[in-house]
């Protein structure tokens, strides 16, 4: 995968994760909510939402509400789990929570499933959640 393709997939995962997080806080999620949350321009988010819809990761109601499809939700939940676990681990190690979250966001996209599962097992044991 080229660098540009990788960054595109990373961006896609961030959008799906954001929709998931917003859906836990808001009764409905719109593109403007995503733009506000990520501090992105409305046109940029609009293009991304069209891409997510074309890839069948989201559906958009006639009112403009965004809903994750089963596939989109699966990806979003996986990314969110990685983000949360890695953030908690870094905070446990003494990293400032904001820095930990930012670093976790970078790591969550690049780690292989095999390495993540090995780390997850160790981290959960260290954090007393196994």
Image (cartoon, rainbow, N blue to C red):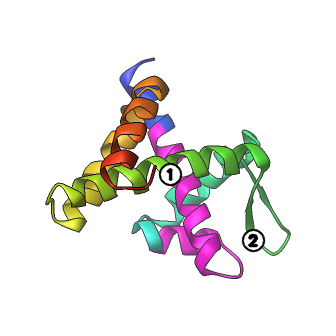
- State which quarter of the image contains the N terminus: top left
- Give the quadrant of residue 2: top left
Read off the residue under disc 2: 65
Rendered position, 125 above or below 129: above
Report the Cα–Cα distance between label 2 and label 1: 24 Å
Q: Which x, y percent locates residue 80?
A: 50, 54
Residue behind mark 1: 81
The answer to whether 59 is drawn above or below residue 111 in the figure is below
In the image, the segment drawn in magenta is 10-36
Q: Residue at x 29, y 53 (%)?
A: 89
* Residue at the (77%, 43%) spot, across then down: 56
Residue 23 is one of the magenta-drawn residues: yes
Mark identifier at residue 58 = none
Q: Answer whether residue 42 is magenta in the image.
A: no
For label 2, count other residues whose C-alpha is less than 10 Å away and answer few (under 14), some (14-19) or many (20+).
some
| Image coordinates for residue 99, horizontal then vertical, percent | 20, 60
Q: Which residue: 61% across, 68% down?
A: 31
Which residue is depicted at the point 40% across and 52% down?
Answer: 85
Q: Is residue 10 left or right of residue 127?
A: right
SS at badge 2: loop
């Amino acid at each position: 995968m080229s660098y540009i393709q990788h960054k595109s997939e990373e961006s896609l995962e961030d959008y799906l994760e954001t929709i998931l997080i917003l859906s836990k806080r808001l009764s409905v999620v719109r593109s403007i909510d995503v733009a506000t949350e990520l501090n992105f321009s409305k046109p940029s988010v609009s293009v991304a939402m069209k891409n997510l819809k074309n890839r069948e990761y989201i559906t958009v109601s006639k009112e403009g509400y965004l809903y994750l499809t089963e596939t989109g939700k699966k990806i979003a939940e996986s990314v969110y789990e990685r983000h949360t676990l890695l953030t908690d681990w870094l905070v446990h190690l003494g990293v400032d929570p904001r820095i930990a979250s930012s670093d976790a966001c970078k790591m969550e996209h690049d780690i292989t499933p095999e390495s993540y599962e090995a780390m997850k097992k160790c981290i959960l044991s260290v954090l007393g959640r196994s």
